[in-house]
Amino acid sequence: SQTIHQWPATLVQPVGSPLSLECTVEGTSNPNLYWYRQAAGRGLQLLFYSVGIGQISSEVPQNLSASRPQDRQFILSSKKLLLSDSGFYLCAWKHRGRGKLFFGSGTQLSVL
Amino acid sequence: ELKVEQNPLFLSMQEGKNYTIYCNYSTTSDRLYWYRQDPGKSLESLFVLLSNGAVKQEGRLMASLDTKARLSTLHITAAVHDLSATYFCAVDVLISNFGNEKLTFGTGTRLTIIP
């Protein structure tokens, strides 16, 4: 069966510090991968998606970046965090083509 | 730009009552998803609606899709406390000729069931 791992679960970082969130998927190949952000009490905003290794599409201009160094690994990064980067970050995957998303457990990021 | 709107945003209802959450979207799509999120948790898939007129039911929840009206509904029957959560609808948008898609989520409806 397929599983998705996302870590860390909670992160508190000072403004201006770097960020690295990692997500890995097991039990499938060539998944589509996604990073979403959810501000407190709000909906989900798609940040990045990837349909293959090294292929990253950005949805929203920001100081975040994403990389996909391996087929089932998706990384969200920042060189310098802003207060506005606080939120709940969710990694998700789906099979190629159409279908539902499977979400990771999420990372609660607080930038202070 | 695709817009997905849900209403109401907040819903407080008594146990045993019925209610409906509405999801409107602004572009043509023949597929819609419903998710549930408990506080501080991730999203759990509830329903996948694959075509116009599709209806899916699971326990006290029933979802339907009208692609012509660009409307989906999530109906709650005889609500119980365990259904308290935030519910999201999501609409898919094709991003390539290979059928890959990305989901745009609605604003969410925070449902609170009062004993």
Image (tube, rainbow, N blue to C red):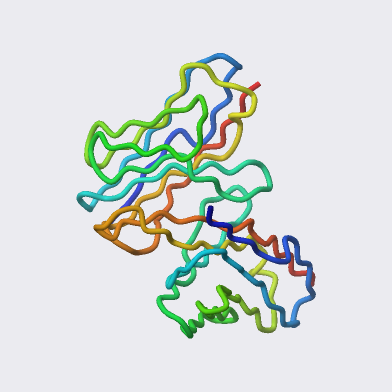
Asked if residue A48 can be seen in this view, the reply is yes
The structure residue drawn at horizontal position 46% and vertical position 22%, both measured from the top left corner, is A78
Is residue A33 placed above or below A70 in the rendered structure? below
Name above or below for residue A2 compared with residue B83: above
Q: How many marks?
A: 0
Q: From what the image shows, is residue A18 above or below residue B54?
A: above
Q: Residue at x 51, y 82 (%)?
A: B57
In the figure, is residue A111 to the left or right of A104? right
Image coords of residue B83 (percent x, y): 64, 69
Taking the view exactly as shown, the residue that stands out farthest to the left is A29
Q: Which image quarter: residue B3? A: bottom right
Query: Which quadrant is the C terminus of chain B positioned in?
Result: bottom right
Q: State the image quarter where residue B112 is shown.
A: bottom right
Residue at horizontal 54 percent and vertical 28 percent from the top: A11
Q: Nearer the viewer, residue B63 or A14?
A: B63
User: Picture coordinates of residue A53 (x, y %)?
Assistant: 23, 38
The image position of residue A96, as x and y in percent, is 26, 57
Name the spot of residue A66 as percent of width and height, x first: 38, 31
Res. A1 in view: no
Is A8 placed left or right of A54 in the picture? right
Q: Residue at x 60, y 76 (%)?
A: B73
